[in-house]
Image (spheres, rainbow, N blue to C red):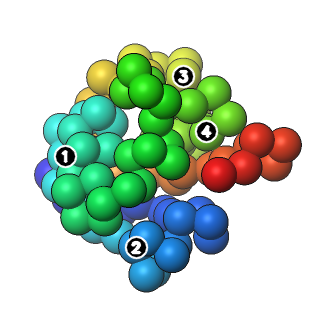
Amino acid sequence: MSVKVRIPTPLQKLTGQGEVQIQAANVKDLIAALEKNYPGIRDRICDESGRIRRFVNVYLNEEDIRFLKQEETGLKDGDEISIVPAIAGGF
């Protein structure tokens, strides 16, 4: 499944662009694919245990994945993911 991922400005130094296309079945796989293509990005998004940091919000088609299945949230072709850092937390 090809998913469009909106990359926040602080992480664009790793990706070189504001949007990328990633193949993934769920959010956990998406983060792994991002790390494979853009080394170092996972450490900015996830903590040491692999969970999404509390100051990073991830939205699937404008819905917060915290209210879905978090990292296990399934993705389908054409979905859009937005990674949004909290203003107070930062990267």
Is 78 left or right of 63, judged from the image as shown?
Answer: left
According to the picture, the residue beneath numbered tag 4 turns out to be: 57
- Looking at the rendered structure, the secondary structure element under dot 2 is helix
Q: Are marks 2 and 4 in contact (CB under 8 Å)?
A: no
Category of crowding for the residue at label 3, using alpha-carbon neighbours closer than 10 angstroms: few (below 14), some (14–19), many (at least 20): few
Q: Mark 4 belongs to which amino acid?
A: Asn
Q: Earlier in the sequence, mark 2 or mark 4?
A: 2
Residue 15's disc number:
2
Report which quarter residue 48 is drawn in.
top left
Q: CA distance from mark 2 to mark 1?
A: 17 Å
Q: CA distance from mark 2 to mark 4?
A: 18 Å
Q: Earlier in the sequence, mark 1 or mark 4?
A: 1
| Residue at x 40% of width, y 73% of height | 15
Category of crowding for the residue at label 1, using alpha-carbon neighbours closer than 10 angstroms: few (below 14), some (14–19), many (at least 20): many
Q: Mark 1 belongs to which amino acid?
A: Ala
Q: Which of the two discs, 2 and 4, sits closer to the camera?
A: 2
| Residue at x 76% of width, y 41% of height | 89
Category of crowding for the residue at label 2, using alpha-carbon neighbours closer than 10 angstroms: few (below 14), some (14–19), many (at least 20): some
According to the picture, the residue beneath numbered tag 3 turns out to be: 66
Q: Earlier in the sequence, mark 2 or mark 1?
A: 2
According to the picture, the residue beneath numbered tag 1 turns out to be: 24
Is 44 left or right of 36, judged from the image as shown?
Answer: right
In x, y percent, where is residue 36? 20, 56
